[in-house]
Amino acid sequence: MKHLIFIAFLVFGINASAQIESIDEIEIMGEWNVVNSDGCFYGRLPIYNNEYKRPISFIFNDNDDTIIGWEYAVGTSYLRYAGYWITHNSDRYILHILANVDYDGHAGPSLLNFVITQFSNDEMTLQTLSGDGNLYLNKNTSANIQSVHNTKSEDNKIYSVNGIELSEPVKGVNIQNGKKFIKK
């Protein structure tokens, strides 16, 4: 009997360790690119209709619009959504995206809902609520920074510690070319 309990614990323990431990809205903030998708997508919202468009990127902003990039047969479009939030029940995390646009005659707010089945700092998998389709995303961590240039120039201007430009150094602490010096 002890062996049976141990085997059951081992099986359930391994299964539980593969689940996401914790995730919140702050952790998914930023730009995510869709790198792959599989399965069936269907329904009335555009995310489920592969014939007309498919998502290529998600931008989750704190206290601002959520943006989803859509690839159409004729080009790319970026649509703004009202926001996002994550709920959690005993066995899964659900990402809700509030869509405040019209879809095929449906006016008013709608929700795009996904189960977050995999998450790390730079990878996330979203699954349809039905479990029929998956979107695989990678986080864009470069923020599109091409290079960094130092534009510091030495203009020999003198400033007080309050940031006021001086015509000549005053008694006490002064700042010139980003360096502090003391005049006695």
Image (cartoon, helix red, strand yellow):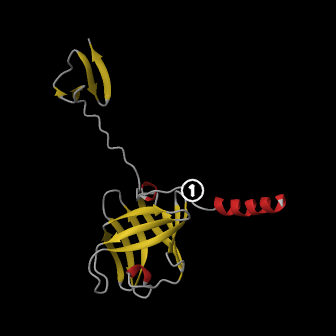
Nearest to the observer: residue 158 or residue 8: 8
Residue at the (46%, 68%) spot, across then down: 33
**25 to the left or right of 133:** left
Q: In which quarter of the image is residue 16?
A: bottom right
Amino acid type assigned to the residue bearing label 1 in the image: Glu
User: Above or below — where is 132 with respect to 65?
Assistant: below
Q: How many labels does the image show?
A: 1
* Element at label 1: loop
Looking at the image, which residue sits at the far front?
1
Residue at the (42%, 54%) spot, across then down: 26
Nearest to the observer: residue 23 or residue 52: 23
Whole-percent x and y of residue 93? 50, 64
- Quadrant where the image shows the N terminus: bottom right
User: Above or below — where is 45 with respect to 65?
Assistant: below
Whole-percent x and y of residue 10? 75, 60
Residue at the (26%, 22%) spot, across then down: 174
Q: In which quarter of the image is residue 46?
A: bottom left
**99 to the left or right of 15:** left
Nearest to the observer: residue 170 or residue 132: 132
Looking at the image, which residue sits at the far top?
184
Whole-percent x and y of residue 143? 41, 57
Count neighbours of disc 1 (C-alpha within 10 A) and say few if under 14, some if 14 to 19, many if 20 or more: few
Whole-percent x and y of residue 48? 44, 82
Nearest to the observer: residue 90 or residue 17: 90
Name the residue that disc number 1 marks: 21
Looking at the image, which residue sits at the far left?
167
- Quadrant where the image shows the C terminus: top left
